[in-house]
Amino acid sequence: MTHGSQRLLTVGALARVEGEGALHVAVRGDEVEAVRLEIYEPPRYFEALLRGRSYTEPPDLTSRICGICPVAYQMSACRAVEEACGVVVDGQLAQLRRLLYCGEWIESHTLHIYLLHAPDFLHLPDALALARADAALLQRGLRLKKAGNEIVEILGGRAIHPVNVRVGGFHRLPTQAELDHLAMVLRQARTDAEDTLGWVAGFEFPPLTVRHELLALTEPDGYAIDSGTPTAALSGTFALRDFEQRVREHQVPHSTALHATLVGRPHLTGPLARWNLGSERLPDGIRTLAAEAGLGQHCDNPFRTIVIRAVEVLWAVTEAQRVIERYERPLAPAVPVAPRAGTGYGATEAPRGLLYHRYDLDDAGIVRRAVIVPPTAQNQSAIEADLRAFIQPRLHLDDAELTRQCEQAIRNYDPCISCAAHFLALTVDRG
């Protein structure tokens, strides 16, 4: 809406993201003066809820932070608690956890690609319009997402907020018949994932360059998902126990979610960071397909993250197949974990980026302090800076088109706003 020199653009509810928020853009003359990603969702106080709880409870409680990526919270919580208790879960139990995590990457990324973001590139209003335009294509996406859901359901006990994960391992091991079923499902999923990568590679990507510091976990022998060392593109690796000294959270007046910076400046975590810091550790066959899809070893355009997500889906499918093919049933579903006083740190790569947990336990295993830093909280400052750069050359657009393109740019980051404290009220104030 335009009144004289003032122009207001409002999206009452930004669709196709997880959470509730608003975007306020202030323009003076021909310059974007300020961009604020305003998160007004009430604080959720999970860190406070964990205080006074037993060391066995964080995996179940933190999984409720997100219905889309609960496994990420469970895995980071388990790693932190197990470190505090002096226990390492390795071997086939660790491989089963990796299989579970692959399932979450498959279902979460596929949800984002097909239902949330692809309609933007196809100039469609939503996934229902995509279904009307090409039902078989959307069926492929739903079939691929179902493959991820089945992995999570079989390994985790149910597809949303899994209940089979515990400190030390699992409550129950999968049967061979269940793994055989997953192997069959994954054969089709691999074809679907390859077709998905070829499909999104053909999208048109608006120009935008990310110049932020990038942060992701890295592994020396593979693509990081359930473990790794924090690595920054410019400042290098650092110990996980130093995370809170490097990544500092702070409150901003316009958001109920904390912002975070890496050594004092905005940084970005997630697919773009993982790709730039770890793509050379992907299997050769997947790197070849990624190159054919237009991805080099480095990528600085956030609109191309939809292609990176498609590559990660393909990798997760192949990694899940590898785990199942080499699986040998452990003697027990979990290793014993006795309580003790200590501090433990855990981090994994959630679909949206690095997820950090820290727990301080007393000698009875009671949580005395908990710190959780989700990826979306880390990304907020970078998102605001990228939007400012994106909007500036597009101020000539009419209200409807500028709003549409801003929404598409927001969805590049697949923000999980509830994890950080959902749609986007966009206001452009021109003076």
Image: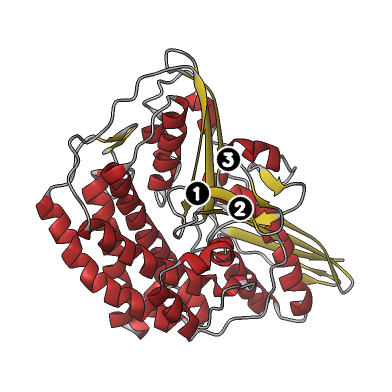
Amino acid tagged 3 = Leu
Give residue 167's position: percent from left, percent from top. Answer: 34, 31
Rate crowding at label 2 as few (under 14), some (14 to 19) or many (20 or more) other CA atoms within 10 Å.
many
Which residue position is annotated with label 3?
240
Where in the figure is residue 300, as x and y percent of width and height? 64, 72
Instruction: Give the vertical position of 395 relative to 70 (above or below).
Output: below
- Compare marks 3 and 2 and give the one earlier in the sequence: 2
Q: Secondary structure at mark 2?
A: strand
What SS does tag 1 mark? loop
Residues under labels 1 and 2: Cα distance? 9 Å
Residue contact at pointers 1 and 2, CB within 8 angstroms:
yes
Q: Is residue 332 left or right of residue 142?
A: left
Which numbered tag is attached to residue 228? Answer: 1
Amino acid carrying label 2: it is: Thr
Q: Quadrant of the N terminus?
A: bottom right
Q: Residue at x 49, y 26 (%)?
A: 49
Rendered view: 89 above or below 404: above
Q: Which mark is residue 231?
A: 2
- In terms of image quadrants, where is residue 131? bottom left
- In the rendering, at what x and y percent does residue 130 appear? 39, 79
Q: Residue furthest right?
A: 29
